[in-house]
Image (cartoon, rainbow, N blue to C red):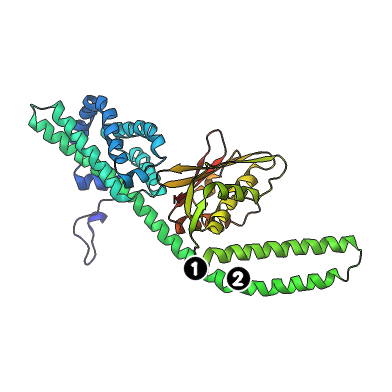
Amino acid sequence: MPAALIRGPGEPRFPARMSESLLQELKRYVDFGPDDESALRELRAAAAPEFPAIAVLFYDRILSHEGARRALAGGESKVGHLRTTLVRWMEEAIGGPWDDAWWEAHSRIGRVHVRIDLPQHYMFGAMNVVREALGASVDRLWPADPDRRRRTREAVGKVLDLELAIMLHTYREDLLSRATRSERLATFGQLVGSIGHELRNPLGVIESSLYLLRGRTGDDERVTKHLDRIADQVRVSNQIITGLLDMVRDRPLVPETVEVEALVRTSAAALSPPTGVTLSTDAPPGLTVRGDPVQLGQALLNLVMNAVEATVPRGAVRLVARPEAGMVAFEVDDDGPGIPESVRDRLFEPLITSKAHGNGLGLAFVKRVAERHGGSVGHAPRPGGGTRFTLLIPAA
């Protein structure tokens, strides 16, 4: 008897499908087959000239809705580029090939939606705009052939259902990742909360002993040098403990209307870049956000410090603030070597760092501040080299 047909108590009497990918399973679920592929390829050949008009309709619909416009990646200034991207997406969605490479390419689009925190209901609404527009194209192309119209409309429905399944799968990936991260952070918080204060006691003893020893060393420069090194390391240890405790405790926000220009200027003034690194700022007057100025200032300072450290020994850092669809975007650019791929996806997690002497707490703090203010933070390769961090905070 074939091994696949051997079953134990309570197991199904039919063999399971072996090594079936998620894409293959979904195709089978929506009954997407060769006839649908053929119909879609014919539609692409006939309807491709209409795709740019559909892209215009798509983004006109988004721009007419305040909530959807606010979720628009890149803001209204990027609509021209996004229309071109949508046309390419329709060409791939309708033209295939619907294989694993197609699945992965469109999963990357879904992960972008997750990264910019696009609400799922806007994704469903946007997909329905495409569905209606393609259905209207089908009706115009074959008005005298009802069977062909029906067959093509069904194929369009199936492939867009596959696209929605891809998008929802990326949101599920993110949900599971967030759950795992929350569990890890909860454990991390318990550990930090229990040992952070305990470490303060021995550090306090060391500081007291240093104070007494300095009065007894006389003029011995070698001893003084070593005492200074001990004091420096005690200071670093205290900073790490403070950073860890800030990560796990929710200091209450003290919100007020904050002048963005002053916030940018103050954050930049708190840092003196080393020789060879330039720091410039640009913020329009009159722009305001609603938030805690102390925590927002610390978040901006952390981003600027990271950028400065990335450009050492020589380079340029730029802090820019600008309005963006109901938010204020704080962009911190550097022309350093960029972020290693090995830590790129986990950069905002505590204790994850790409720096040789970093502690991995600065960006985790920035993310926490952003989320508590109803905003977000992300990063991307900077045009021309380096990295751009973007902190989004709701405008006042």
Q: Percent position (x, y) of residue 87?
A: 32, 31
Judge whether 106 appears above or below 188 on screen.
above
Judge whether 301 appears above or below 229 on screen.
above
Mark 1 lies on a secondary structure that is helix
Q: Percent position (x, y) of residue 284?
A: 52, 41
Pick whichever, 275 or 313, lies toward us. 275
Mark 2 lies on a secondary structure that is helix
Mark 1 near mark 2, Cβ–Cβ under 8 Å?
Answer: no
Q: Mark 1 packing: few (<14 Cα in 10 Å), some, or many (20+)?
A: few
Question: Where on the picture, by quarter, is residue 280?
Answer: top right
Disc 1 to disc 2, C-alpha distance: 14 Å
Q: Which residue is at a point 66% across and 65% down the rendered structure image?
A: 238
| Amino acid type at image mark 2 | Gly
Judge whether 363 appears above or below 84 on screen.
below
Q: Percent position (x, y) of residue 375?
A: 44, 53
Which one is earlier in the sequence, the residue at label 1 or at label 2?
1
Q: Percent position (x, y) of residue 285?
A: 52, 43
| Amino acid type at image mark 1 | Thr
Q: Which residue is at a point 68% across and 39% down the rendered structure image?
A: 314
Question: Where on the picture, by quarter, is residue 11?
Answer: bottom left
Relative horizontal placement of residue 315, taking residue 97 as reference (left or right):
right
Label 2, on which residue? 196
Residue 71 in sight here: no
Residue 324 in sight here: yes
The count of marks equals 2
